[in-house]
Image: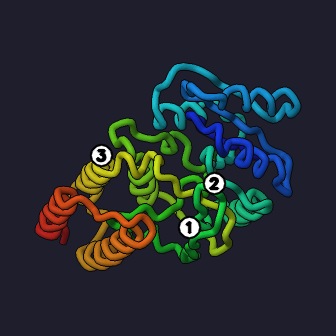
């Protein structure tokens, strides 16, 4: 069975579509842990409306403590050995859980399986898609400056990773990136080519509002895992840096019509030069 972790904060506009996409999965053996992180809109009322008619839904409500605390709380509260993530504005395809769970059951040595995904806008219109490689590329090299997963698409084998699963509170807005860096040293991680999630692009999303803090947290995570633990060789570092630098620039300017802050780029370039001097 699966424990689905759904962090909720002021998500009233899209929460119904998200929950409906979970309840309409082709498999029904799961619990849905909804953690309301101090919402000030009608999110909590919406959650109780669902919980009153479906006993698979558990609700935790409290004051605002942030995403990292909320995710770790969901992990602690989970009853089952498989964890699925979803955000409160995204939409699952009906076979998402079935396909990911089947993969993990057939590959018990895999810790994390993510999926390819569609980009949708605030009105649910398709604006793009991303098909990810289904090779174990993220075990051999970490994609610098870009997460290897769409975070809300992942399903994780909690029994396999144990205490390694928890997010580190020191990496605000890049907690998932640091987790993949850490897990990639010990476990197999992979994406599926199947598009199983519709990832909503919002002008108010956390990652966009806090891009500067996110980049700095990524730099610190890389500095720890690359310089201290030598998880990358120089060739892989250069290749993945160039790939992700160009991809991120394209996404920011074509989809969002924004330029990356110059001071952020300068700090990232400084880090790359520092790493290239130390990685053998």
Instruction: Please name whichever residue, 83 or 230, is drawn nearer the observer in this view of the structure.
Output: 83
Q: Quadrant of the C terminus?
A: bottom left
Which residue corresponds to mark 1?
Answer: 190
> Is residue 110 in view?
no
> Quick one: SS at disc 3?
helix
Q: Can you identify the residue that label 3 sits on?
A: 213
Residue 30 in percent (x, y) is at: 79, 43
Asked if the residue under mark 3 is in contact with the one under mark 2, i.e. CB atoms within 8 Å, the reply is no
Residue at (58%, 53%) from the top-left corner?
152
Q: Residues within 10 Å of mark 2 (few under 14, many from 20)?
A: many
* Alpha carbon distance from label 2 to label 3: 26 Å
* Residue 112 shown left or right of residue 194 in the figure: left
Find residue 20 and report its horizontal and vertical position in percent.
78, 47
Crowd around label 1: few <14 · some 14–19 · many ≥20 (10 Å): many
Q: Which element carries disc 1, helix, strand or loop?
A: strand
Q: Which label belongs to residue 155?
A: 2
- In front of the other: label 1 or label 3? 3
Sequence-wise first label, 1 or 3: 1
Q: Residue at position x 73%, y 48% from top? A: 17
Residue 13 location, quadrant: top right
The residue at 30%/79% (across/down) is 239
In what element is the residue under mark 2?
strand
202 or 206, which lies in front? 202
Crowd class of label 3 (few under 14; some 14 to 19; many from 20; radius 10 Å):
some
Rendering coords of residue 32 (x, y %): 73, 38
Q: In the displayed structure, would residue 210 be above or below residue 238?
A: above
First along the sequence among labels 1 and 2: 2
Q: Are marks 1 and 3 in contact (CB under 8 Å)?
A: no
Q: Position of residue 228 (x, y in %)?
A: 23, 54
In three-dimensional space, the C-alpha distance between marks 1 and 3, rounded to whole angstroms, equals: 27 Å
**Counting residues from the N terminus, which is met first, the one under dot 2 or under dot 3?**
2
């Amino acid at each position: 069975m699966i424990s689905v972790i759904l962090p909720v904060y002021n998500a009233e506009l899209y929460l119904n579509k998200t929950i409906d996409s979970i309840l309409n999965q082709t498999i029904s053996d799961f619990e849905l842990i909804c953690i309301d992180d101090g919402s000030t809109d009608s999110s909590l009322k919406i959650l109780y409306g669902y919980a009153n008619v479906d006993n698979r839904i558990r609700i935790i409500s409290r004051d605002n403590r942030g995403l990292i605390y909320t995710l770790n709380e969901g992990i602690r509260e989970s009853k089952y050995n498989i964890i699925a993530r979803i955000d409160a504005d995204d939409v699952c395809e009906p076979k998402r859980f079935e396909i990911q769970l089947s993969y993990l059951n057939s590959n018990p040595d895999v810790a994390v399986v993510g999926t390819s995904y569609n980009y949708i806008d605030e009105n649910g219109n398709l604006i793009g898609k991303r098909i990810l490689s289904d090779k174990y590329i993220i075990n051999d090299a970490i994609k610098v400056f870009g997460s290897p997963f769409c975070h809300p698409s992942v399903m994780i084998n909690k029994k396999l990773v144990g205490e390694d699963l928890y997010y580190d509170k020191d990496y605000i807005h890049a907690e998932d990136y640091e987790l993949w860096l850490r897990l990639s040293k010990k476990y197999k991680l992979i994406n599926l080519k199947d598009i199983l999630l519709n990832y909503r692009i919002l002008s108010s999303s956390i990652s966009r509002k806090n891009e500067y803090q996110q980049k700095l947290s990524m730099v610190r995570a890389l500095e720890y895992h690359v310089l201290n633990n030598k998880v990358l060789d120089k060739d892989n570092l250069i290749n993945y840096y160039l790939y992700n630098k160009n991809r991120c620039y394209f996404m920011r300017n074509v989809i969002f019509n924004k330029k990356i802050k110059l001071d952020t780029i300068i700090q990232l370039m400084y880090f790359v030069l520092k790493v290239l001097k130390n990685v053998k």
